[in-house]
Image (cartoon, helix red, strand yellow):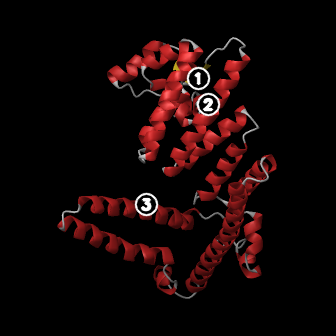
Amino acid sequence: AEHCINNRKEFHKHPSYRKFTLLHPDEINKIREGEFANAYLVFDDLKNEGKLYYEDKEYYTCLSLDEQAYSCFQWLEFTDTKRKEEIFKSFDLKPIYDNEVRKREKDYQGDTCEISTRLAAVVNILLNMHSAYMQLSHYTEALQCCDEIIGLTDLSAEAYFRRSQTHTYNLKSRYADLAIAEKDIKIALNKKPEEKKYIRHLGILQKRKQDKLTEEGNFITGLISCAKKCVEFKKTRNIATAETMVETPREIKIMKVMKKTYADCMEFYRDNDDNKKALSTAKEYIAFCCNSYYKMIKYYKFDSTALEPEIIQTLPIETQTLVNDKAIV
C-alpha cells in the first residue's frame, strides 16, 4: 500500500476530469494531433452538445462530452499505448503509477493567436463543467475546475466568483473555507465592481458565515453540556445508564420520524403504481440520510484541538473552559 501511495502522488494531483482523458476514444487522439481549426470545430460541437444535455438535466452525459471537449487541448496519455489496451481488454485493475502517464497539451508552435483561442476555449469549458458538477453537488471537482482556471489566468473574475460559490453552497465547508470564499468574491468584485450577481453573492456569503458561527457554537455548547452531564453522572451512577440522563440529539429524533414518513410515502406510491414518484421519494430520502449522516458524524469526529478561533470566541466562557477539560473531551 505504501509503495502504491508513493508512486501515485503526481497522478493524484491531476483533477478528476483530466484523469478520465486517459480512457477517451482513440478518435480523439487524431483530432489532438491534427490542425488547430479541426480541433476547435470538434471542441465546439462537443461543447454545444453538452449544453443541450445540461438543459435536459442530464448532467453526467453533459460532463462526458465536456471532458472530451476539454481533452481536445489538454489531456493525459499513457507512456506505453499497450497499457490502455490492457485496461479495456482484460479489465486490468492494476494501479496507474506516475511513470506510466504524462500530461500533454496541443502544440501551437508559438502561434499566439491559436494559444489565446485555446486558453479562452479551455476556460469556457471548465466553467461549463463547474456548473454541471455543482448541480450534482460534486464540490471537489467543481473546485478543481476553478483552481485550474485561476492557474491558467488571473484575469477571470468569474472563476473567483464560482470558487466562492462552491465553498458557500457546500454544506461540509468549514468556517475557514467560507473565509476563503469571502476573499475570492472580493477579488471578483475588484475586477468587476458593478457586477450585481457578485454583490448579491457577497451578502449571501456573509449571512452564511454568521449562520455557520451560530450553528457551530450551538453544536459545541450542546455537545459539551452532554459530556458534562455524563461526567457528573459517572461519579455517582453506572455509566451505562447515563444515556437516559442526556437528551437525544435533535437530528436523531428527526431522522427517526422521517425514516418512517419516507417509507410510508414510497409504499403508497408503489401501491398506486406511481413508480416515478416512488423513485423521486427514494432519491430524496437518500439525500436526507446523507445530509443527516454528515451532521451526526460531527459527534464522532469532534476534535476540540481543531476548533477555529472565530468559533471559540462565540462560545460562552464556561464552554470555552470545558473545551480544554480532558475529562469532558
Q: Where does residue 101 sit, x and y in percent of width and height? A: 55, 21
Above or below: residue 27 compared with residue 4:
above
Q: Quadrant of residue 258?
A: bottom left
Label 1: state its secondary structure: loop
Q: CA distance from mark 3 to mark 1?
A: 36 Å
Q: Which amino acid does the dot numbered 3 rest on?
A: Ala
Residue nearest the viewer, comparing 11 with 328: 11
> Is the residue marked by circle 1 packed among few (<14), some (14-19), or many (20+) residues within 10 Å?
many
What separation in Å lies between label 1 and label 2 (alpha carbons)? 8 Å
State the residue position of label 3: 287
Say above or below: 5 vs 100: below
Of the image marks 3 and 2, the number of the one nearer the N terminus: 2
Quadrant placement of the C terminus = bottom right
Left or right of 310? Residue 51 is left
- The CA span between labels 3 and 2 is 32 Å
Residue receiving disc 2: 122
Residue under the image location 66 percent in, 25 percent down: 117
**Residue 20 visible at all:** no
- Helix, strand, or loop for circle 2? helix
Q: Quadrant of residue 40?
A: top right
Instruction: Give, as a three-letter code, the residue at label 1.
Output: Phe
> Front-most of 102 and 131?
131
Percent of width and height locating residue 162: 65, 48
| Residue 298, percent from left and from top | 56, 65
